[in-house]
Structures are given as C-alpha cells and as structure tokens.
Image (tube, rainbow, N blue to C red):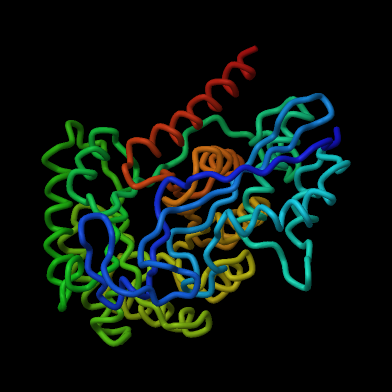
C-alpha cells in the first residue's frame, strides 16, 4: 500500500504556547493572558495560541491516514525545539516532505517511522512536532493497510502481547486546580491533579507555604468526596523546578520540604515532577540523583519524576541508566516519532524505572488518540489525559478511545 497524495492543513492545538522563562521570572496573569515581555526566542508574547498542522496521507485505496503535528506548551525551554508555527512550516513540508512521501510503502510502521525520524533536510532533522505528526499518520496508514487497530500494529511489529485491561490515567488541572480535582474524583482518575505549580509568588509561595496548604486541601478533598475507599489515587504534582528556585537547588533542603509535603499528602502516595531545574542535562541528572538520595536518607517515600532536560529517547535512556529518578515522563511530542515513545517506555520498564507516557495539553484529539494506542501496546505505569486543560474533554478523548479499543479486542477474543 503506497501513498499517492499528501495534504497539509493548518489547525489549532487545544491549549497555548507559554514562555516558561518569563513565567518563572514572575510574569503576572491578567485574566487568561500574561503581562510583560517574552524572554524565549520566537515568542511574540508570553502566552500565544497553540498551533498544529494536520498531515493527511491519501493511500492507493483512496482512504485517508491522518496525524497532527503539535509541540509542547513550553516550547523552546530546557533544550526543546523552538516554537512551532504553521505558517512557516507548511511551505517547508510541501517542498521537502511531499516528494519523500509520495510513492512510499506504508505497510511497516516501524520502518517508515525510523526512516523519516532520521531524515535530514539542509543539514537539520525535521522539527520534533513534524516527526511526531508524521509518525501518527504513518501509524494510521499501516493500520489501514493491514486492517488492524493501531495498537495491534505496534504489538505485531515489536513482538508485544495485546493485553485487554485498562491503563492508569493521569488528569491535569491547569490553573483550575481546585474545581478540577472535584471532577477528577467524580470520574475516579487514577492519578491527579498535575497542578501546574509554575510560579513562586502565586502558586508555590516564597517558602513553599502555598503548595503545602494545597496538598493538605487535596488529600482532605479526595477523602471527603470519594464514595468508596477503594478509590485511592496517586497524587502527582508538577512544580516546574520552582522548589529548587526557593531553596537554591540545595538537594537536602529540597528533600526536607518534599518530605513535609508527603506528611500532608497522607494517606496518598506523592509524586513530584521536576522538583528543580539545574539548567543542563548533566546537571539535572546529578541534582535529581542527590535529591532522591536525600529523600531516601530521610526514609521518605516521595517519588521523583524526571521531565525537564529529558526530551529525546536517548535522554530517557540516560536518565534511567543514571538511576536518578523513580519515574520518567516520556513527553511524546519532544521525542518526535511515536516509535521513540514505544522504545522509551519499553526501556524504562525493562530497567526498573516507572514509565509515564505524558505529552502536553497543547495537542489535538488525533495526537491524543494515537498516543493512547502506543500506550495500549507498551503498558506504561501512567498515561496523561490530554489534550487541553479542562480535564473533561481530554478524559473523554483518551478514556473513550481506550474503552473502545478494549471492547473491540475483547469481542475478537470472544469470537
């Protein structure tokens, strides 16, 4: 089965591009936007709308395979690719990618994904967002060509077992971190709330007091709202390095603070994502390792989740090999082609580090569903509910795709 035509369409992502550097430096919110000057290259303002590009592959049988190019909310930060803008990307793709795609045989997703992930144009690889969207389209095309569900294509090509059981889902709240928790408890999401603690004065507190109060409220609210004590979610909070900022990246002080949060989180387990940002990959590995060692010395069970500076498949391998964290976020758009997400999740699991298949609020329904199929094949420990920050919309997209897939798999097994 070959590609006979390619179409690119501009689109909207489900959230916004945010200049992380400006926000960390105290850019204040005015309604939904942020005041002040942008600090990261490519940004015209601190918050601007998220963009996507749909890649539509017309196959020989006239069916259309689709994928959406999308980039993370905090593009250009912590070693990530620069801002992704449709207006400049589409002409480039029409000139350089279309000739490579027309006539390409799509029957092997893995071979196709690996080829285009390493494609070099003018001495540079394709933007991670392009590789991400193209791989979704190639997975869709292989699914059409083989007459199988997307996750079955991955299972077949990687030699994985197709398991008919649900995945553990992780809800993200955005700034609506109180009302969203109520929604998550009602829908019994497995991990919550993400929290978006990306600013010291407004969200963390100059000495961490605001987050401490929030964790206390969070634990009590879950216990008050749940109708069955068998619902026992994990607390997973992303602090974007702000804890390190208030403690000058002192591993012992950071660990002491996180251990105090653990007491407030009880009886729920606590995962802290990105406790500090060392400003480089090597520095980040060393700092996370020191924080984790300090927590262990305290007898604390707080789990450290790596995010910043862990962008590519090789980064995931390096963080896992360094034994510097309990869980790694596999941030799907940053890894480029989806085959890297598959390989990264399997590497984590094979080496005793929990795999969290994440991504960004700034994606689309198509990319979220494609990622769900990758997760159904590799079975990571946690899967992000996406896109958007409203929770309900992302939960509907991801959970329903999961349950539809499971229903089909169980029906086939019964037959």
Where is 256 relative to 356, above or below? Answer: below
Residue under the image location 58 percent in, 34 percent down: 163
The answer to whether residue 280 is left or right of residue 188 is right
Percent of width and height locating residue 122:
78, 70
Percent of width and height locating residue 280:
49, 82
Looking at the figure, which quarter contains the C terminus?
Answer: top right
Task: Tell me the quarter of the picture where residue 157 sits.
Answer: top right
Q: How many marks?
A: 0
Residue 270 in view of the camera: no
Task: Tell me the quarter of the picture where residue 202 sits.
Answer: bottom left
- Name the outermost residue toward the right: 103
Residue under the image location 41 percent in, 43 percent down: 385
The answer to whether residue 108 is left or right of residue 330 is right
* Front one among 95 and 75: 95
Where is 398 relative to 290, above or below? Answer: above
- Name the outermost residue toward the top: 415
Percent of width and height locating residue 303:
35, 64
Residue under the image location 81 percent in, 46 percent down: 101
Looking at the figure, which quarter contains the N terminus?
Answer: top right
Residue 337 in view of the camera: yes
Percent of width and height locating residue 321:
58, 73
């Amino acid at each position: 089965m070959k590609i006979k035509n390619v179409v690119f369409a501009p689109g909207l992502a489900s959230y916004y591009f945010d200049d992380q550097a400006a926000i960390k430096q105290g850019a204040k919110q005015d309604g939904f936007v942020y005041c002040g000057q942008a600090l990261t290259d490519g940004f015209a303002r601190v918050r601007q709308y998220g963009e996507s590009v749909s890649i539509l592959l017309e196959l020989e049988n006239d069916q259309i395979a689709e994928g959406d190019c999308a980039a993370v909310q905090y593009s250009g930060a912590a070693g990530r690719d620069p801002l992704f803008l449709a207006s400049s990307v589409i002409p480039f793709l029409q000139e350089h990618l279309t000739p490579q795609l027309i006539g390409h045989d799509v029957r092997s997703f893995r071979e196709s994904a690996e080829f285009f992930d390493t494609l070099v144009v003018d001495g540079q690889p394709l933007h991670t967002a392009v590789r991400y969207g193209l791989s979704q389209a190639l997975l869709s095309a292989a699914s059409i060509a083989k007459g199988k569900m997307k996750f079955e294509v991955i299972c077949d090509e990687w030699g994985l077992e197709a398991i008919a059981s649900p995945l553990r889902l992780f809800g993200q709240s955005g700034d609506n971190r109180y009302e969203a928790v109520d929604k998550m408890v009602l829908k019994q999401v497995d991990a919550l709330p993400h929290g978006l603690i990306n600013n010291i004065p407004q969200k963390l507190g100059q000495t961490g007091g605001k987050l401490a109060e929030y964790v206390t409220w969070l634990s009590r609210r879950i216990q008050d709202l749940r109708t069955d004590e068998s619902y026992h979610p994990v607390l997973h909070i992303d602090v974007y390095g702000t804890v390190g900022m208030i403690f000058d990246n002192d591993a012992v002080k950071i660990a002491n603070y996180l251990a105090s949060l653990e007491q407030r989180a009880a009886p729920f387990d606590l995962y802290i994502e990105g406790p500090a940002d060392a400003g480089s990959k090597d520095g980040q590995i060393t700092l996370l390792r020191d924080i984790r060692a300090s927590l262990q010395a305290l007898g604390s069970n707080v789990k450290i989740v790596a995010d910043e500076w862990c962008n590519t498949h090789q980064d995931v391998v390096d963080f896992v090999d360094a034994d510097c964290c309990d869980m790694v976020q596999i941030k799907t758009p940053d890894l480029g082609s989806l085959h890297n997400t598959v390989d990264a999740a399997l590497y984590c699991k094979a080496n005793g580090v929990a795999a969290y298949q994440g991504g960004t609020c700034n994606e689309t329904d198509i990319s979220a569903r494609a990622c769900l199929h990758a997760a159904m094949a590799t079975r990571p420990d946690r899967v992000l509910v996406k896109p958007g920050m409203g929770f309900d919309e992302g939960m509907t997209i991801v959970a329903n795709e999961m349950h539809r897939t499971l229903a089909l798999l169980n029906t086939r097994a019964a037959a």
